Image (cartoon, rainbow, N blue to C red):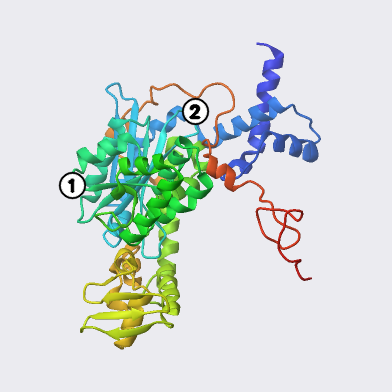
Amino acid sequence: MDETFIQRKHTAAVVGSMVIPKHCDPKTVYTPKDIQTDMLSEHGVNLSYMQDWRAKEKALQFLRGNLADSYSNLPKYFYILEETYPGSVVKLKKTADECFLYAFVALCTSISGWQHCRPVVVVDGTFLKSAYRGIILTASTMDAARTILPLAYVVFDSENDASWKWFFEQFKQAYGERPSMCVVSDRNESILNATSIVYPGILHYSCMWHIWTNIRSKFKKGHLQLHELYFATARSYTLDEFNERMSKIEEVDPRVKSYLYDIGYHRWSRVHATLNRTWTMTSNIAESLNAVTKDARELPIFDLLEYMRTLLERWTNEKLLKAKGTFTFLGAKFNKELDDNRTLSEKLRVRDSTDHIHIVLDSVKRNIVCLENKKCSCGQFQLEELPCAHALAALRHRNETYENYCSPYYTRESLLRTYEMSVNPLPDESKWNVPQHILDEVVKPPTGDKRQPGRPQKERYKTYDEIKSKKYKVSCGNCGGEGYNKRSCKNALKKK
């Protein structure tokens, strides 16, 4: 065997074993260049970049084992999950020749907690970054603290109609179907098809941010005017507000109005929705969960699924502690919203009309509040399911408290019940007692193409708005305003 090859292989193995501690946490960024710098400063050894790159690959192999073997560990891992967390739904699907297709995990903690959250399911997927291509999908909802409750995490070999249909079938087995349930996602055709088959009775809503990115790419006219106008239209509380803003959109670009009409106003507009999603207008909570797992997507599938489980374990325990430390009737963010409305209500005057109907006056307009039906002519009371400023003024006029007029999904009691079932740690793998027939089960890696030569893509391609939002903003040295400089400033000189 070639002596140079032996030396190169030996160097990679030795250096790789030395840098293993640097790679234990998937969030740690430790590059071949870092290895090169540390080896020179700490050991006086000058290695080439390729030697350092091979050393890093060796370290990862020592830590994570063979990527293909990771799939063969799934049957025993899923068996232990079911034994440790009774009531969980974990499923593994293979091809006829025993190659991996899909893996689904919904832990009993999430299944129990779901009953105390609004039945809005937000789904989103993102690509894996390991040698075997695939997609990790998360389904989430919002708890009474307005934070993320992960419901399920799934790995697909590829994203298509069949994989999404399989996901929703497993989700339905775990979570069933609740009244007023809906799904929020981007406008992925496979999601639309799957929900219509598996959940024909529930509604699908579109993420308003994804619709905006489509508008941005399809129509090049008047983006600066349309951006704020579109989001204000989507969030409108009344039909009058919506129609007024839609007319302004039509003035800027009639094609955009036609595009939004073709999608269906009910899919993205709060006031047209037949089910109340309250604050869940985007798929941001699922995308936020994907962002948290960004670094873990490089892991082999066994380690990836365990990373997701430990994340849920940590989050559940932390959120239960926070819930126990909450002493307000509502969760913190909803309580802050209520306090803001209460401040606004102090300037309002109230006039009785009937026992439950009140006219609330400010300096500009009047609003009619019906406490019996929990509605206000401003639209905010019924769409947010939280007393608006007008409703709070009416309640104060009646010397009545607000508690009976808030959604039960916003309360501290719901928050405590959401996380009352903790996620206990798994026993060490050496203590697993797994039946032989489970150990004998074969799971081969996916049959799809492995990663192409060269450095893999680490980030998805950014939309124009995401790139634009991070660009340097011009500010004025005279008055401090943004969007212009000192030379073009028309304001008075800033006092020093």
Q: Is residue 326 visible?
A: no
Left or right: 24, with 303 as reference point: right
Residue type pointed to by label 1 = Gly
Residue at 38% of width from left, 37% of height from top? Answer: 155
Residue 341 drawn at (x, y percent): 41, 75
Disc 1 on helix, strand or loop? loop
Left or right: 131, with 437 as reference point: right
Residue 186 drawn at (x, y percent): 37, 42
Residues 181 and 234: in front is 234
Residue 333 drawn at (x, y percent): 43, 68
Residue 290 drawn at (x, y percent): 46, 45
Residue 7 sits above or below residue 251 on the image: above
Residue at 45% of width from left, 63% of height from top? Answer: 318
* Quadrant in which residue 351 is drawn: bottom left
Mark 1 surroundings: few (<14), some (14-19) or many (≥20) residues within 10 A: some
Q: Is residue 244 visible?
A: yes
Left or right: 129, with 261 as reference point: right
Sooner in the amino-acid sequence: mark 2 or mark 1: 2
Residue at 50% of width from left, 24% of height from top? Answer: 451
Residues 434 and 171: in front is 171
Disc 2 on helix, strand or loop? loop
Q: Which residue is disc 2 drawn over?
A: 131
Q: Which residue is disc 1 drawn over?
A: 201
Residue type pointed to by label 2 = Ala
